[in-house]
Image (cartoon, grey):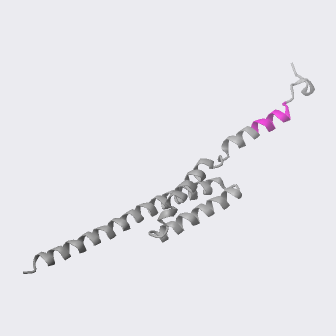
Amino acid sequence: MHQDQSTLPRPLPWLAALAMLGLVACASTPPPMSELAVGKAAVERAAGSAGEAPGEMAMARDKLARANVAYANKDYTLARQLAEQAEADAVLAEAQARSNRSAKALSEVQAGLRQLRSEAARP
């Protein structure tokens, strides 16, 4: 029994196109909205530390700006990475600022102790 080609069901071209679209949609990287928001919030929170940790703050701001450019260019993977790095740099800036303030306070306490010792040692 030989079946005529014209009687076989023909695949629907739109069904194949729809399946391909579904695969492409699943494979694409979603926009890093939350990462950008968290990075921005971290940079804004650490802005008060800018004077005490200028290098770290400059890196955080630069990476956040680059993340926004990557996002605008739809390079979501790079945008996500840069936003996460900006957050880390902002956290580092805050920690560095706290460390600098602590070191300054310690230095002032030590200077005060030296002064008290020298006054106590006077006859």
Q: Is residue 15 magenta?
A: yes
- Foreground of the two, 41 or 68: 41
- Foreground of the two, 91 or 69: 91
Residue 111 percent location from the top left of the image: 24, 74
* Image vertical order of residue 86 relative to residue 34, above or below: below
- How many numbered marks does the figure carry? 0
Write down the quadrant of residue 121 in the picture: bottom left
User: Which of the image's four quarters has the C terminus?
Assistant: bottom left
User: Which of the image's four quarters has the N terminus?
Assistant: top right
- Foreground of the two, 15 or 28: 28
Residue 63 percent location from the top left of the image: 57, 63
Image: magenta residue range: 11-20
Write down the quadrant of residue 52 in the picture: bottom left
Q: Main secondary structure of the magenta part?
A: helix
Residue at 85%, 35% (x, y): give it. 13
Residue 105 percent location from the top left of the image: 31, 68
